[in-house]
Image (cartoon, rainbow, N blue to C red):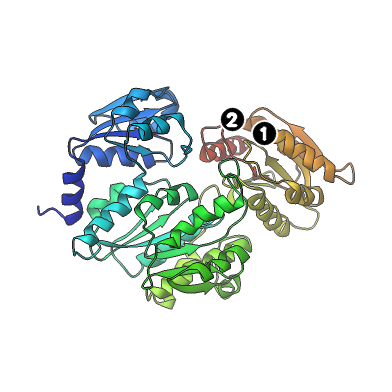
Amino acid sequence: MRQSLVDILTTKKFQNKKVLIMGLGLHGGGVGAAKFFVSVGARVTVTDLRTKKQLGKSFGKLKGLPIKYVLGKHQGKDFARADLIIRNPAVPDDSPYLKIARKHNVPIDTDVGIFFATLRAATLRAELCPAQVIGVTGTRGKSTTATLIYELLKTRYKNVILAGNIRKSVLLELPRLTKKSIVVLELSSWQLEGLQKHKKSPHIAVVTTILPDHLNRYKNMRGYINAKKIIFKYQTPDDYLFLNKNDKIVSGFAGEAVSKTVFFRSGDARKYQTNLPGKHNLANIAAAVKVARHFDVPEINIQKTLRKFSGLGGRMEFVLEANGVKYINDTCATTPDAAIAAIITITNQLARGGNLFLIAGGADKKLDFKGLARLVAKKVRAVILLPGTATEKLEKTIRAEIRNKKLKIQRVDNMKKAVRAATAYAKRGDAVLLSPACASFGLFRHEFERGDEFKKAARALK
């Protein structure tokens, strides 16, 4: 079978090279990177501060591959002797082990960076780029928007690929790429930082929202926003930038872009029937529709897809109704703004007299809880708080907003107790919402495990 240009480039570049995967992780990125570098003949070492048991399924997916493991720790010598380090996007720039690598002039990259570098290399060799890339970023809505774009494009094109921050490494998709491929990438701010060294942005960039987030990683909002700007920073006049007109920060990017700017608005989506809950999803729908039209997806295809698409797990996900009480899993709400959107949506759906019981709390990202606390004081009947570095701050902020004694606040030490506590308060017509407004680390391995524990506890009530 004839090798593609991408196969030739990657095999030639990485064969017999010592590649260190820093952070196997739990979301598929590290697994995909490890598999890719093994496939192109690299000598792969995986190092992670987690143990084999903690890595669970991620470790199991690499069974049988010729990989060296250093688990439960990092070793400085591995970083000094590697030919290339692929860092998990969650690894901070000031990691002492990355400092060792830089001291020894070892190149550091990410799986997304390698993907874009490969495409760039193909282009520089006077070949057509083997795929067109759509990048989607934003504080909220990027997963839903990226997935919806993928679903819409699939109705007209054969080889559409969804990867990136959606828990799937894009490197595994390289062998499938052709000149007719369309790759939809969800890109976090951390992944975008990996593109900086390559001076590369997607052909088509979509920005949903910019709201405070990851301020435990960035010094201030300016640093966070600058990371998001990388999605269009290296675009050309032949590229396209889709921006949310309803978001002041996002719409302001138009003045800095050299690419062709296309605006979308929440109001553009109001004419479509959809099962996606909440007004905040209108902007996500509008973005996906604009991109679909750019690719000449027929209107009838757009309408059918929107009617079928009911959203992603962990994002306003209806779990069940038990004894007349609804249970909703919104574990991916890791910021106060996301939790606010969920509370507004659910309380608007409740029948008259219905009450909302909120499960929240977790790890601190140095975000401001005042707006959430004011809404909770008005709309929520009881708050059940999970352990975490942000929980005390969240509780104090809520208590400062309470104007009456109706709102109850209770702390528990695990999800099972949280669901039971909320259920003890709830009656027929009420709803129990997991919308933490915080990261999951500490009590859970990741936010999806948190959501799974919530669903398990809720289903045990039946």
Q: Residue furthest right?
A: 404
Tag of residue 365? none
Q: Residue furthest left?
A: 1
State the count of labels. 2
Q: Is residue 139 left or right of 13 when viewed as pictured?
A: right
- For label 2, the residue is 443
Who is closer to the viewer here, 406 or 339? 339
User: How far is the residue under mark 2 from the one under mark 1?
Assistant: 8 Å
Q: In terms of image quadrants, where is residue 236?
A: bottom left
Q: Is residue 247 above or below residue 103?
A: below
Going 36% across and 30% down the picture, which residue do you hit? 59
Q: Is residue 23 left or right of 335 when viewed as pictured?
A: left
What SS does tag 1 mark? loop
Going 89% across and 41% down the picture, which residue do you hit? 405
**Residue 369 locus on image (x, y percent):** 72, 46
**Residue 97 locus on image (x, y percent):** 41, 29
Q: Is residue 304 visible?
A: no
- Amino acid type indicated by mark 1: Leu
- For label 1, the residue is 386
Q: Residues within 10 Å of mark 2 (few under 14, many from 20)?
A: some
Circles 2, 1 touching at the beta carbon (< 8 Å): yes
Q: Is residue 300 visible?
A: yes
Q: Is residue 9 left or right of 458 when viewed as pictured?
A: left
Comes first in the chain, label 2 or label 1: 1
Who is closer to the viewer here, 425 or 346? 346
